Image (cartoon, rainbow, N blue to C red):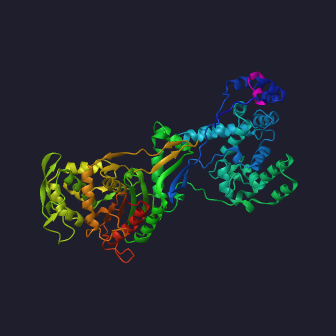
Amino acid sequence: MTGRRVTGAAAGFVGGSVLAGLLVGIGVTPVLAVAGVGTTSAIDLFDSMPEYIEIGDLPTRNEVWAYRGGQPVHLADVWDQNRQELALDQISDTLEHAAIDGEDKRFRETGGVDPTSLVRSLVSVVASGGDGGTGGSTLTMQLVRNIKIQRASELPTEQEREAATAEATKRSLDRKLAEVKLAIGLAKEYSKDEILAAYLNIAYFGDQTYGVQAASQRYYGKDAGDLSPAEAASLIAIVQWPDARDLSSPEHYADNQARRDVILRSMHQQGHLSDADLQAALASTPADYVRLTAPRQGCESAVRGAEFFCAYAVQVAQSLPQLGADTAAREQAWRTGGYRVQTTLDLDLNTQQKDLLDRYDRAGETRFALGATLDTVEAGTGRVLTMAQNTDYDRSSAAPPTATSLNYATDESNGGSKGFQVGSTYKMFTLLQWLESGRSPDAVVDGTRKARSVWTQCGQRVTTKAWNPKNDSAGQTGPYSVRAATAQSVNAAYADMASKLDLCDIRDTAARLGVHPATGGELPANPASVLGTTSIAPLTMAAAYAGIANGGVYCAPVVIDQVTGRDGTQIGGQPAACSRAVSASVARTAFQVMQGAFRGGTASGGQTPDGTTLFGKTGTTDSADQIWLVGGSERAVTAYWQGNTDGGQANLRHYANGQGGTYAGSRAAVWRQAQTAVNAALPVG
């Protein structure tokens, strides 16, 4: 909040001489004497204290948005503190009256300190020996205390937070005098409306709820601009004693109502409540109007199926350079909040893909630990349109078997999953290097299984342990064109191709397309790696294939289109990171060769009914415990993975999925349905 100089009565209370006159005039001097504190000492203590405190920006919600029907829609709120800051004109007059009449009747007449109330408070503090004391704090003084408590909550360690909170709330003469001086400073620096708005936005209303808007939504399911007198008074009744008076439990209703009724009568006395309205409000009980509404906190509250994407997007948003110069600054900016994060998620597509996974890859599978994802990436931008997963999202330690917090689509650092062996989907990188080296897609290679031990690795001829990969079926043998070997996914043929290339070049081609192990580090350059023995995240593979659809230009995955600050200023989205990975001609030829998978190849049945030209590649590990299909159109690529998530090797060709086929056997059908919707949303041409 921006400070504004204010003239008037507030300017009077400043300096030791004024304090001396105030102490004598209101009769505090004898009280101080009883406490063993001379007036001069009190003045010296007062003068040594800081005189200014800033209201500043209060921590508030960060909003995460997606798209539905092509239009932005709210997805979830993520916050350090559940607060939504409002301007005073967004808060009902009834609520303003309840706050002033119930807490500080002379708020608009005093300069931040009410002398009559102050002496009562100081007397109680001294009488209690510093261990107690009640009353006397104006709204401005309460705001000072709340600002200190708020700042304490933002300290980095629990020990620091507890110590600072204790200091801000202790019952002592020096703390009360400090509040007096800072309240005077606030009254000089800010208008009454700014102080009242800050008070209503910063106050704690129990149940991890801050500010009147969040409290109104939590307890009544409505906005702070639409409250009845009873509802408004019940909210203000909470602030003095949140633990006993909040409305989260019927056990608190009696204490809340007792204080509420005091506030209502005060509103009536001040002319802000008619006789009839007073009687109607007093006749009600909190049970009549409390409607507890669950806060939409965190990605758990997002649309079902979007939770994993939401959590990933939040992690990315927190690291955006626009939020601060270093990690500490960015973390503080995110905690302060108020950002609106527009993500790339297409809820229509994501929901459709989630429904497919719920049908074909049921999280309730009990025979083995089944995981599955569908991830769609837009070619040319890297925008992640979907991130559907067969499990529910649950971060608790008591998550059921059908739920997890592991995001199977992303790297370990982004969601905890260690990735999965990608099988023959990795063959694309050998194909690309084959073409990059000037070789023809119509060249004939040997598909007969044989042991090989001599390879070229980083320019050197090396001898390894004999490697003799088997083909998927005994009938795969003899000569194949590279086109046919790709369409039929003949392992021995690709081993033959790799033996004519440099393994490091194949690795480097994959790396230029953003491919890396899900656990971090570099890709291996050994013979087995060319058949996909490395564990890689599905999102990584989708983005790599999207680079080929994009004519050889790879774009790293992007999940944030735009971030808007709390002041409404757009500060930009996730920076695009696109670079040429292979030549346009190589990409074009690879795209054409890989159409064979859908034209009688291993992805037969995956061709979409719209007739869109598709390219792609299936992948199946030796034990068929991991099953893949990655491919798409010139506009977008979808990666479909299903497999064991616990290290087991249940063969997905042998388990029925409850839909008239096996898990592996339904691969093309599931992918086809997902890509059909993608094609409709992003048509080619």
Query: 282 or 633: which is nearer to us?
Result: 633
Residue 109 x/y as whole percent = 81, 35
Q: Using the rendered view, name the quadrant where residue 665 is placed.
A: bottom left
In the rendered image of this protein, does residue 400 appear above or below residue 189? below
Q: Residue furthest right?
A: 275
In the rendered image of this protein, does residue 401 appear above or below residue 513? below
Could you tell me what secondary structure mostly forms the magenta stretch?
A: helix
155 horizontally vs 519: left or right: right
Query: 71 or 207: which is nearer to us?
Result: 71
Residue 200 x/y as whole percent = 69, 45
Q: Using the rendered view, name the quadrant where residue 352 is placed.
A: bottom left
Query: 115 or 453: which is nearer to us?
Result: 453
Magenta range is: 9-17
User: Residue, x 68% and y 54% (percent of image)?
Assistant: 223
Residue 445 x/y as whole percent = 14, 61
Asked if one can make out residue 350 in the rendered structure from this viewpoint, the answer is yes
Q: Does the magenta stretch include residue 349?
A: no
682 horizontally vs 194: left or right: left
